[in-house]
Amino acid sequence: MLTEQDASDAGRELSKLGAAKGGEARANKLSPERRREIALAAIQARWEKAGKPAVPIASFTGDLKIGDTIIPCAVLDDGTRVVTENGLTNALLGSRSGASKRLKRASVEQGAPLPLFIAPGNLKPFITKELLDGPLKPITYIQGDRKVSGFDATALPTVCEIWLRARADGRLQAQQADKAKQAEILMRGLARVGITALVDEATGYQDARARDALAKILEAFVAKELQPYLKRFQPEFYKQVYRLRGWAFPSEPKDQRRTPLIGKITNDLIYDRLAPGVRAELHRKTPRDEKGRLKHKLYKWLTPDVGDPKLGEHLAVVTGLMRGAKSWAQFKELIDRSLPRYGDTPYLPFEG
């Protein structure tokens, strides 16, 4: 469980929020998820103030099943796949015996605490500094309302290999043979499928990987706040649209985008082809007036470092394609071939 100090900090943070927004009653109306976010943020802030690194949070959790063995696992918010220390210990050693606990205490007293599953002294020749600084380095993370001790998921095959190497070298005692046998069983199970894929399947993260990739694209393209107004669509873009559609281009700038079709055409040529999911996210963030019209230009939500420059490049290419086309049909063929909409079937030229 979280410490009393952690809980106290979280409570104070929620109280502050209540006072700032109209009282404790208002804070109590927050969803459990939002209250948890605020509490965790307060805890992270306290750790940072104390000079400690922020503790990652388990975004996905599950049970890794290898034969009859079950090991709790998680995917952290930074993408790290982990297995719990208790789960790894039980998988290799079974229930914690008095002897294993004494080994743990002895390792702590020696100033270099080792997890129980590699605590026996006859395993030391096979445990390198690289392993201790790598997969065997403990990871503390938050799951629900408690801190959990775990290891990178690759620690599982690493530990199994340590036990099997010790057995092959004749270093194990007779009573340790069953531990090496269990390590062999686990290694055989892991040989059928990679540990990363196993953890992703157990936690449900495999279904979120595509969504996570899309989220990263949207984070790069779409800003959290409205950007200062700068004109992005030059008249030349609209002149070419009107020319290819056979429309008379309005002489007054204020009338140049009054044709309702212009909005649909712009969505098709620009926002649907800029990056996956960008158009939907821009529309989601942009409020509408009582008549259903957008209150802001969509491009004002684009990030200045990625989204906006990409828009400029895309507009230049589209305008160039329009200049070189003699008809709307020819232009559409060109753009569908060179800049297809995301989610569309790629253009495939077939000769008759």
Image (cartoon, helix red, strand yellow):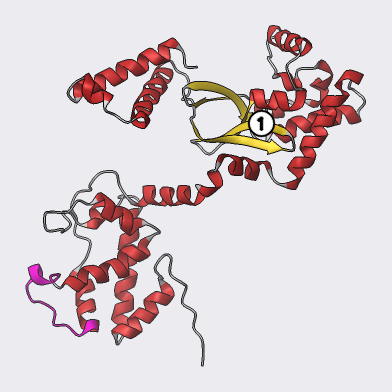
Q: Is residue 244 above or below residue 129?
A: below
Q: Nearer the viewer, residue 238 or 104?
A: 104
In this picture, residue 206 sits left or right of residue 17? right
Amino acid type of the residue that numbered disc 1 sits on in the rendered structure: Ile
In this picture, residue 188 sits left or right of residue 23? right
Q: Nearer the viewer, residue 144 or 311?
A: 144
Q: Which residue is mark 1?
A: 71
Q: Residue 242, image x and y in percent?
A: 20, 79
Q: Which residue reaches farthest top?
A: 109
Q: Nearer the viewer, residue 195 or 113?
A: 195
Q: Residue 246, image x and y in percent?
A: 20, 85
In this picture, residue 245 sits left or right of residue 42? left
Q: Secondary structure at mark 1?
A: strand
Q: Nearer the viewer, residue 185 or 260?
A: 185
Residue visible at 26% across and 71% down in the picture? 265
Q: Which residues are magenta?
A: 245-258
